[in-house]
Amino acid sequence: MTMPDVKNNPSARSSEAVAGPAQASLPERYDPAEIEVRWQQRWDADPELYRAEPESSGRPKYYVLEMLPYPSGQLHMGHVRNYSIGDALARYMWMQGHNVLHPMGWDAFGLPAENAALKNHTPPREWTLENIAHMRRQMRRLGLSYDWQTEITTCLPDYYRWTQWFFLRMLERGLAFRKQSKVNWCPLCATVLANEQVIDGCCWRHEDTVVEQRDLEQWFLRTTDYAQELLDGLDNLPGWPEKVRTMQRNWIGRSEGATVDFVLDPSAQAPEVRGPGKAPLEAPDNFVPGTPIGPDAIRIPVYTTRLDTIFGATSLQLAPQHPLVKQFAEVDARLGAEVAALVEEQKKAREAGDPAAIEKHGNFTGHYAINPFSGERVPIWVANYILLEYGTGAVMSVPAHDQRDYEFAKKYDLEVRIVVLPRRNGEPPAAGLPDEAVLPYTEEDSLLINSGKYNSLGCEEARDKLAAFAQEHGFGRPTVTFRLKDWGVSRQRYWGAPIPVLYCPKDGIVPVPDDQLPVLLPEQVDITQQDGSPLGRIPEFVNATCPRCGGPARRETDTMDTFVDSSWYFYRYTDAHNASAPFSRQKIDYWFPIDQYIGGVEHAILHLIYSRFWTKVMRDIGLIGNDEPATRLFTQGMVIKNGAKMSKSKGNVVSPDDMIARYGADATRMYALFAAPPDRDLDWQEDGVAGISRFLGRVYRLGMRYKDSIRGRASRTPAVPSTPLAQALLRKLHQTIRKITQDFAGRWHFNTCIASVMELVNEITAAEPGLAEMPAEASAELMGTILPSLILLLAPFAPYLAAELWNETGGTGALLRQSWPPFDPDLAREEELEVPVQVNGKLRAVVKLLPDAGSEDMQRAALAEAKVQAAIAGKQIVKVVVVPGKLINIVVK
């Protein structure tokens, strides 16, 4: 067999083509350590092996990507499972003739590195880069097919320079802005968290650490500008799991309603004589709905999704932090103390993780607001269950038709007024709820009562007319709100990309010019968690020159949230060494969108929303043409040990290094794919890795037994004998190829793929006595057909062993550049099918039929069965239902 010309033949550009050692030096037993280390060295010596070809290659492109890891220092089996899924797919797509981009990098900034550096007394940069080096070695040892020439590290200046550049482009477009805001503060991280990083009231990194609320001036990215597009775009992602799309829809939280301005009644009673305020006060006799609101009136905007119930509003509830409440409290010491108590109750509810479950308390402010539709003066209360950040921080309380309002009204004896009732033959009953209905009554397919000229209208029609009237008369408007808030990206910590702005006494906020990027992060820093960002204590960093006026300026000392870095990293992979732009538009147009993205469902709200936002911003800037980052998303299940997700914090991590040392990388990877479907949780069992290792040993010995007799036969069309044994083995082979091919294209049930390979090996092994009785040439021809295909089928799952057997059986060229074996549909058909026969739905017999048997043949065979004849004797056949190849049901009476 001649060696291929590696220089001039891209399909053969691999050290896999190097001849293996002499047979005498090969071990008789399967030694994964020896085999895998040898092949790893060969692969590492060939930098072109896993490199994607140029865009002009003519091959269809395929971009497969696993979410980049945080370099904590050690991989665990959860990582191995994720990367093994992506690696199997990448190898399969190469073998299907695609031009594959399969990169890897490091999400290297962030709080964990800084916290670990504090704990270990090691600078974050040094700690992070050492961890990256170790994890890269682990990935290489696992045989993962990454193109390391595209590697990116987010904490290095050649990457975060462009992160800062993107921030400046957003600042130019008004998408980056600074404001005073109530923010989430993790006392353990000593920094601000985005809303998406607060899980059940606790820090996403410290699950038992309660997040506090603080007022700080912060930098934000205006994700709300893209809320509707982010929501609509989910309908264009059928390749994403419905669970992820639902989570994002709920988080974005679109709500349609109306904003209506109640007006503060200037004639409200003085604070010192404020009463209980339990009931609205009637409107003046001369009140006309729609009367213009005077320019000096104090408006209280209220957002509601049930404007149809506004005539049932018997009070107004304000959040304790509402600006109007602050004004009231400044002249009412008693109210001020009551409000402080309500704020504390809210804080405790947030810390408990469920503000909605708070026991509802409130206090009458002594003031009234005028309902613009009815003219009634409704009492203004401050309530602990009203949150400032949702809606306008003010709620019209309609106790008869809202559960929370009802609970509050019953507690404080506020009026409960019914304004919506069920339909009764198209009309509401004269008064009161029917016996079967209970308060609060919230059904929307109802009619209005006690609502002036809107009586007898349906709820939806009434909402439209009420909103139109409010808009026409200048005291309201239809409104769409979103639960999604702007993304707070300021972090008061050291280990992150510096925010590239200056503060000038003369010119205010001044962006750092592009030609002065990157704003470098100082390397020698005394890191503490007190008194704000550590950068603020470094004069040579803080003190700068204003690029506009030339005078002294102060640098921003906050750094960016690490999710900024991971929102665009997969674009940089396509052009990782570009020094003049974040990437080339030509490369992006070729490679994007990502064909398959793989990662954990826990990133559905954080990374996956942020990356979609970033993609849309880059599109609007003109850097890219795609609307979404990835066409398909796969969320793998977790690896469970001792009943909990495998993680360092839980102390149940299994190191792949230990598994590789005992059983080999192939067995470790293959177990991660075999133990459960990839979208389900995997319950870790080391015995399973040992079992896979034993199976691979069987395959190795099988290949070595036949390697000499089949060398060179893969290069020509074999004359396969047509004996029953040969046909049975070929049928099993082609059924296995069909099964794995269809699974890669659809369900990704790699566990059943591997099981089918095991069944094929079992059938080959069981047939060996029969093979020994065949003429040597015929046996060699048969195994020369079967064994190379078996090796190719193993290649995505056990690449080391497959490479060894490919080499030893005479295969040439890089294994992952070989063509995936096709299956013959005729050969893959079962020789006979067993089809159940039912009589009136009860199983009576099973008939054996050819796979292509027609309906008439199936019916004839069923009626010929003795047990069927006995079951239908003396009865009339009404009909015969035939499901080709599946079922025959005879209906009789």
Image (cartoon, rainbow, N blue to C red):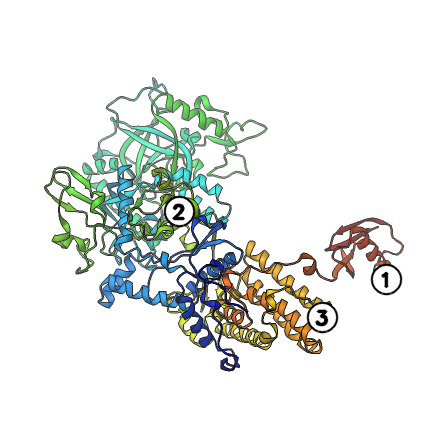
Which residue is denoted by mark 3 in the rendering? Answer: 725
Q: Report the residue that reaches farthest toward the top.
A: 286
Q: Would residue 520 be found to the left or right of residue 410 on screen?
A: left
Residue 880 in sight here: yes
Q: Nearer the viewer, residue 130 or 486?
A: 130
Residue 552's place in the image compared with 636, above or below, is above
Task: Give the amino acid at mark 3.
Answer: Leu
Q: Nearer the viewer, residue 854 or 434?
A: 854
Q: Would residue 83 be found to the left or right of residue 561 on screen?
A: right
Badge 3: few (under 14), some or many (20 or more) residues near its Cα, within 10 Å?
some
| Residue 688 image point, x, y percent | 51, 72
Task: Give the amino acid at mark 2.
Answer: Lys
Which residue is denoted by mark 1 in the rendering? Answer: 866
Badge 1: few (under 14), some or many (20 or more) residues near its Cα, within 10 Å?
few
Task: Give the amino acid at mark 1.
Answer: Ala
| Residue 396 image point, x, y percent | 36, 34
Q: Quadrant of residue 411?
A: top left
Q: Nearer the viewer, mark 2 or mark 1?
A: 2
Marks 3 and 1, the one that precedes in the sequence: 3
Disc 3, SS: helix
Contact? badges 2 and 3 (CB < 8 Å): no
Residue 393's place in the image compared with 350, above or below, is above
Question: Mark 2 to mark 3: distance in Å?
Answer: 52 Å
Question: Mark 2 to mark 1: distance in Å?
Answer: 69 Å
Q: Nearer the viewer, residue 415 or 196?
A: 196
Residue 587, numbered circle: 2
Disc 1, SS: helix
Marks 2 and 3, the one that precedes in the sequence: 2
Badge 2: few (under 14), some or many (20 or more) residues near its Cα, within 10 Å?
some
